[in-house]
Amino acid sequence: MEFASHQGTFCTAARAGWAANLRVGDIHGRADLLERLFSRIDEDLKDHPIAETMHIFLGDYIDRGRDSAAVLDLLIERAKAHRMVCLKGNHEIYLSEFLENPGILGAWAQYGALRRSPLTD
């Protein structure tokens, strides 16, 4: 199973009999696409029940898109019902470092801290 959408957001599931690992990366503030992806995953799991799934998020939840906060809220809510691992991407690392050292804003800005994608505005 493979899903593809805007700017590299993707999900693949490697089914091994009783288990599936769902991998998702590069959400970049696109809560709208993440909601659609969750709907498609849920439909697939309903149509093809699997005893156990692990949702693995590869980072880059924030920046560029319209609603980074909503992306984080969706991930937190999803974790209440699914086994999940959320890794930090470079955007989350920059945010954490910025909170300790605001002087890195210029470096973070190169990765989208101060801009949105022209496709999302």
Image (cartoon, rainbow, N blue to C red):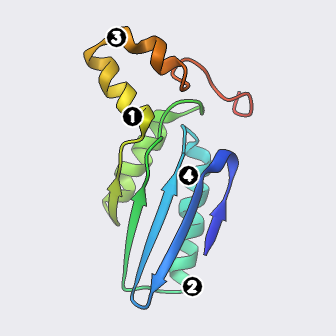
Q: From the viewer's side, name the closer residue of 15 and 77.
A: 15
Tag in front: 4 or 3: 3
Quarter of the image where the N terminus is located: bottom right
Q: Of the residues tagged 2 and 1, which is closer to the observer?
A: 1
Q: Earlier in the sequence, mark 2 or mark 1?
A: 2
Residue at figure coordinates x 59%, y 30% from the top left: 64
At mark 4, the secondary structure is helix
Element at label 1: helix
75 left or right of 83 in image = right
Position of residue 55 relative to residue 92, above or below, is below
Instruction: State the CA–CA distance, disc 4 to disc 3.
Output: 29 Å
Inter-mark Cα distance, 3 to 2? 48 Å
Whether pointer 3 and pointer 2 mark residues with C-beta atoms closer than 8 Å, the reply is: no
Would you name the residue on which mark 4 appears? 34
In the rendered structure, which disc, 3 or 1, sits on the residue that comes first in sequence?
A: 1
Q: Residue 92 carries which label?
A: 1
Residue 9 locus on image (x, y percent): 60, 51
* Residue position marked by numbered label 2 in the rendering: 47
Residue drawn 37% across the image and 26% down it: 95
Which residue is labeled 3 in the image? 102
Count neighbours of disc 4 (C-alpha within 10 A) and say few if under 14, some if 14 to 19, many if 20 or more: many
Quarter of the figure with the C terminus: top right
| SS class, disc 3 | helix
Identified by mark 4, the residue type is: Leu
Quarter assignment of residue 98: top left
Query: Mark 4 or mark 1, which has the lower sequence index?
Result: 4
Q: In this view, does 86 lie to the left or right of 113?
A: left
